[in-house]
Image (spheres, helix red, strand yellow):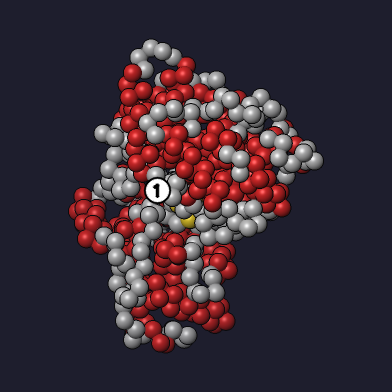
């Protein structure tokens, strides 16, 4: 439940800034997402018939880092490096590039192979990141890269001579090659792919082509370009809507594709939630409200059409509707109830603290608006509070499978717990505030791997939207320094921090979080000489 005593409540910020964010939601109805190295590599391998293969290859070449990897820091480099390296080896095998271009491709592929050897060497095994289906994607791609290396022995490629006798890679610890083999055998025998694997259907390889159990929505297989490319196959099945979907997925990035497309339900809910939670006075287009109401009419909703329903999107959507004055009974959330917390969906591998925070907020909004039959809701809220307090890290932060940064998880959990007066919630929020204050960088920013505007914005939310934050005498100075950093940061720079099959950046959400933090700081009179019209 939002803090009704917030000092920013009812204060109107610069309408043009908020309106621009909302206008983007309607101008880009399918959502705005960063291009994906992983999905671009898979699409290039699985759908060579798709126009603009040159653009996808250019994207892969330009995205490689000096150490030969692709993707994020630490463990997050493994999956995209496997995908990009395999894709470049596939292009070389097809022999559809000029000699000069083949030299560039071979050099990049060789650097990728060297990077994989470092990532996967036995003395320092790569740990699988907690990204979507990593335990199945890693062994699938490792096997494909090994198959390329086997072919090099009989069909050498200039520039990759040293790899013809190289040892083959082993799947990283934490992989599940046996589970992958069983899933493929089930699909081979039955022709059916379980719905929970649709979003990662590309792991099935050629078996995925036209799998009869798969039901695309708007041409998309579970909002995944990679899965859709696998389902279409090579040559593509006669599915014009799915072919058109893949073409549209690459339209905004010169052929490169995002990892999840479309993105609109999740994007709209999180964008509105950031602005409304910070007290930004916005005029939400009626069409956005109607779309959200329609999505929840049938019960629990997913992040976009074709994705399975989940407690995270549903809880956040219900809380957002309530804050817009359109409350709905949250009964659909009961299907995700477990003994001591709520799952995103039944059978998930890793529970999500932020999903539970959003369920807590949805129930709190409901309880605040009615006194009839809320006993079960209150009991569930108490269990969620106890579970969130229990999974808080010793240092006061939280972490979550949907975002690589602890500042995201800590902001969402602390804000959900802030209105609660028992169950250890108050102490948990105070510890979160203390951790936030203790981890600020010298330049006023915050960030897991380095300074980012998005993470700095989450820290400002923690400090200025919680009672414990506003009560701490250190907060004003820390938030002012964060505010100064945000004003000097490029508002269009959004390093990928969100977790799907790899790290990505939902740009509209990142803009909204930053704008909301600037609003919080400026309306808290941290910078008396800065007017709200200066928000970028």
In which image quadrant can residue 127 be found? Answer: bottom left
Q: Report crowding for label 1: few under 14, some 14 to 19, many 20 or more residues within 10 A (C-alpha).
A: some
Position of 88 relative to 362 (above/below): below
Q: Which secondary structure lies at badge 1?
A: loop
Q: Whole-percent x and y of residue 193?
A: 28, 48
Q: Which residue is mark 1?
A: 393
- Residue at 48 percent across and 28 percent down: it is 419
Q: Is 467 on the left-hand or right-hand side of 526?
A: left
Residue extending farthest top = 372
Q: Whole-percent x and y of residue 279?
A: 62, 30
Figure quadrant of the C terminus: top right
Q: Nearer the viewer, residue 91 or 458?
A: 458
- Residue at 32 percent across and 21 percent down: it is 376
Position of 354 relative to 107 (above/below): above
Q: Nearer the viewer, residue 190 or 431?
A: 431
Q: Is 252 on the left-hand or right-hand side of 335?
A: right
Position of 518 relative to 4 (above/below): below
Residue extending farthest right = 529
Q: Is 468 on the left-hand or right-hand side of 201?
A: right
Q: Whole-percent x and y of residue 99?
A: 54, 82
Q: Is 186 on the left-hand or right-hand side of 467?
A: left
- Residue at 44 percent across and 14 percent down: it is 370
| Residue 97 appearing in the image | no
Q: Nearer the viewer, residue 368 or 34?
A: 368
Q: How many marks?
A: 1
| Residue 182 appearing in the image | yes
Q: Whole-percent x and y of residue 68?
A: 49, 74
- Residue at 63 percent across and 47 percent down: it is 478
Residue extending farthest front = 473
In which image quadrant can residue 383 be found? Answer: top left
């Amino acid at each position: 439940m939002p803090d009704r005593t917030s000092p920013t409540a009812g204060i109107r910020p610069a309408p043009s800034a908020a309106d621009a964010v909302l206008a983007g939601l309607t101008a880009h109805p399918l959502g705005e997402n960063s291009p994906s190295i992983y999905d671009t590599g898979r699409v290039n391998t699985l759908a060579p018939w798709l126009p603009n293969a040159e653009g996808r290859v250019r994207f892969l070449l330009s995205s490689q880092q000096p150490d030969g990897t692709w993707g994020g820091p630490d463990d997050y480099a493994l999956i995209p490096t496997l995908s990009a390296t395999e894709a470049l080896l596939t292009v070389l095998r097809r022999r559809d590039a000029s000699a000069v271009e083949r030299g560039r491709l071979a050099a990049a592929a060789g650097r990728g192979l060297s990077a994989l050897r470092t990532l996967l060497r036995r003395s320092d095994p790569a740990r699988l990141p907690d990204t979507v289906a990593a335990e199945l994607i890693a062994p699938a791609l490792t096997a494909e890269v090994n198959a390329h290396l086997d072919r090099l022995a009989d069909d050498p490629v200039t520039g990759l001579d040293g790899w013809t006798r190289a040892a083959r890679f082993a799947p990283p610890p934490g992989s599940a090659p046996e589970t992958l083999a069983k899933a493929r055998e089930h699909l081979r025998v039955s022709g059916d792919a379980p719905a929970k694997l649709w979003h990662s259907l590309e792991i099935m390889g050629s078996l995925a082509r036209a799998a009869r159990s798969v039901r695309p929505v708007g041409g998309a297989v579970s909002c995944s370009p990679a899965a859709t490319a696998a389902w279409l196959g090579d040559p593509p099945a006669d599915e014009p809507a799915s072919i058109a979907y893949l073409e549209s997925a690459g339209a905004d990035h010169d052929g490169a594709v995002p990892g999840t497309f479309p993105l609109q339900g999740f994007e709209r809910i999180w964008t509105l939630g950031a602005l409304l939670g910070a007290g930004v006075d916005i005029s939400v287009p009626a069409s956005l409200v109607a779309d959200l109401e329609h999505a929840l009419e049938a019960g629990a909703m997913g992040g976009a059409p074709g994705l399975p329903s989940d407690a995270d999107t549903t809880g956040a959507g219900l809380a957002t509707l309530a804050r817009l004055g359109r409350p709905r009974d949250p009964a659909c959330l009961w299907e995700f109830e477990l003994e001591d917390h709520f799952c995103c969906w039944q059978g998930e591998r890793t529970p999500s603290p932020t999903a539970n925070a959003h369920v807590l907020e949805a129930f709190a909004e409901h309880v605040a608006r009615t006194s009839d039959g809320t006993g079960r809701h209150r009991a569930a809220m108490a269990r969620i509070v106890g579970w969130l307090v229990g999974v808080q890290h010793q240092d006061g932060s939280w972490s979550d499978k949907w975002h690589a940064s602890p500042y995201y998880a800590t902001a969402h959990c602390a804000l959900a717990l802030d209105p609660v007066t028992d169950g250890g919630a108050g102490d948990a929020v105070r510890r979160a505030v203390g951790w936030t204050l203790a981890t600020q960088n010298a330049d006023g920013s915050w960030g897991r791997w380095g300074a980012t505007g998005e993470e700095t914005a989450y820290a400002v939310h923690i400090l200025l939207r919680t009672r414990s934050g506003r009560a701490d005498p250190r907060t004003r100075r820390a938030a002012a320094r964060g505010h100064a950093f945000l004003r000097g940061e490029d508002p269009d720079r959004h390093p990928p921090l969100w977790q799907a099959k790899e790290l990505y950046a939902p740009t509209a959400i990142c803009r909204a979080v930053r704008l909301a933090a600037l609003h919080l700081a400026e309306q808290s009179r941290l910078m008396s000489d800065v007017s709200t019209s200066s928000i970028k």
